[in-house]
Image: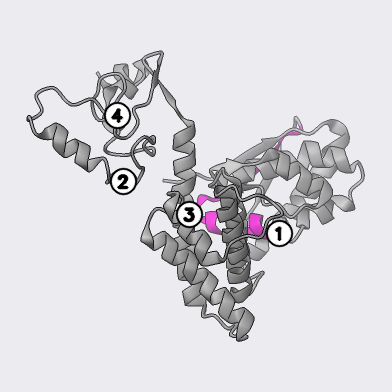
Amino acid sequence: MPSDTELTLTPPAYLYQDARRFLRFLRVAAQKHSVTVTVSISTAGTFRLSIPANQSAGLDAFLQEITFQHGLYYYLCAASNRRDVARLIVKPIIEGLLHSQYDVAYPVQIQKHLLEGTPDWAGGAFLEGTAQQYEILLQKHKLKMITPYEFVRDLDDLLTEFMLQQLEHPKGQQSPKFNVLVGMCGQKDVLRTKEARKLFNRVHSLRTKGLHRLEREIPDSEVTEIAQEVYYLFQWLDDYWRAQDEKTVLLSGRKYRRIRYGKEPIPKGAPIDFRTLWEELITRPCGDCGVIQGELHLDGCDLERCPRCGGQFMCCECRLTQDDLRNAE
């Protein structure tokens, strides 16, 4: 069961009143999204902030809106000791709230946003840059800060830039047409499924109609469907990039190189024709996580083998720590 979000802050004495003012601002601003921010103060000057677990969705929307609308930046513009208040009060609290809601928080982007008003979103699920940009675009669409057509237009630009980056297209040179880029990305295994290539072309087709025929009224249901499919695609790509970066794994205090798809040892006692069947099977993408021969499996893949014992890595006891083993006894 999810627990309440709870944070503590002990500001320096000279910023005590600034901390009280900011938490009052936060409490009032959060009410718009039906978020109840409870604040208590100890005799030692420590502030305790609490938000009920069942208000997580409202807190999510509140954090997005207050960032995209520059609420924190404008608040700090009117504060004395602006940099100290940003660094010692606002940033720790906002960073704590982001960590409670998202897989990844970006402290540097939080600081830049607070002091410079940059439009960067400071938390999310993805690590890769283009995926982060898509998260920002998707949140703006959910908050109705942009129209459905503007979402499709900006998504089309983002997908074009993504493909050019993946193909390492020289800057300054004229880029190929969108459908040609999609085909090239298919050949390079960047967009390795027909569904992904079809999705990219669908986005571009909607954008083109809006440009040339002024058909800019795109149904919300269609945009929502596309937005979710693109999210799943970037989710897979983000998992893929993380997996390729994690080349080793620590097992029982020793580092082992992870086994790549297609490099698995043939199990002892396997039938004579198993090798032939396996060599044919690995010419196709992994049936569970979709990587191709020579690539590292995504986290949690059923087919990844343990580099220590050769068993199924997902549920292998080699992954257990000594504490895990003692608790299991």
Say which quarter of the image contains residue 67.
bottom right
Q: Nearer the viewer, mark 4 or mark 1?
A: 4
Relative to 314, 210 lies left or right: right
Q: Nearer the viewer, mark 3 or mark 1?
A: 3
State the extent of the magenta-drawn residues as a range: 45-65
Q: Counting residues from the N terminus, which is met first, the one under dot 4 or under dot 3?
A: 3
* Distance in Å between CA atoms under marks 2 and 1: 40 Å
* Distance in Å between CA atoms under marks 3 and 1: 32 Å
Question: In the rendering, at what x and y percent does residue 324 appear?
Answer: 34, 21
Q: Disc 2 vs disc 1: Cβ atoms closer than 8 Å?
A: no
Say which quarter of the image contains residue 249.
top left
Relative to 190, 118 lies left or right: right
Amino acid at pointer 3: Cys
Question: In the rendering, at what x and y percent does residue 136 appear?
Answer: 62, 57
Q: Which residue shows up at 54% across the image and 70% down it?
A: 204
Q: Which residue is mark 2?
A: 285
Q: Disc 4 vs disc 3: Cβ atoms closer than 8 Å?
A: no
Q: Which residue is mark 1?
A: 68
Disc ID at residue 263: 4
Amino acid at pointer 1: Phe
Q: Counting residues from the N terminus, which is met first, the one under dot 4 or under dot 1?
A: 1
Q: Disc 4 vs disc 1: Cβ atoms closer than 8 Å?
A: no
Q: Counting residues from the N terminus, which is met first, the one under dot 2 or under dot 3?
A: 3
Q: Under tag 2, what secondary structure?
A: loop
Amino acid at pointer 2: Pro
The answer to whether residue 99 of the structure is visible from this angle is no
Q: Under tag 4, what secondary structure?
A: loop
Query: In this view of the protein, which residue sits in the foreground, 220 or 28?
Result: 220
Q: Disc 3 vs disc 1: Cβ atoms closer than 8 Å?
A: no
Q: Under tag 3, what secondary structure?
A: helix
Measured along the vertical axis of the image, is residue 320 above or below residue 79?
above
Relative to 85, 196 lies left or right: left
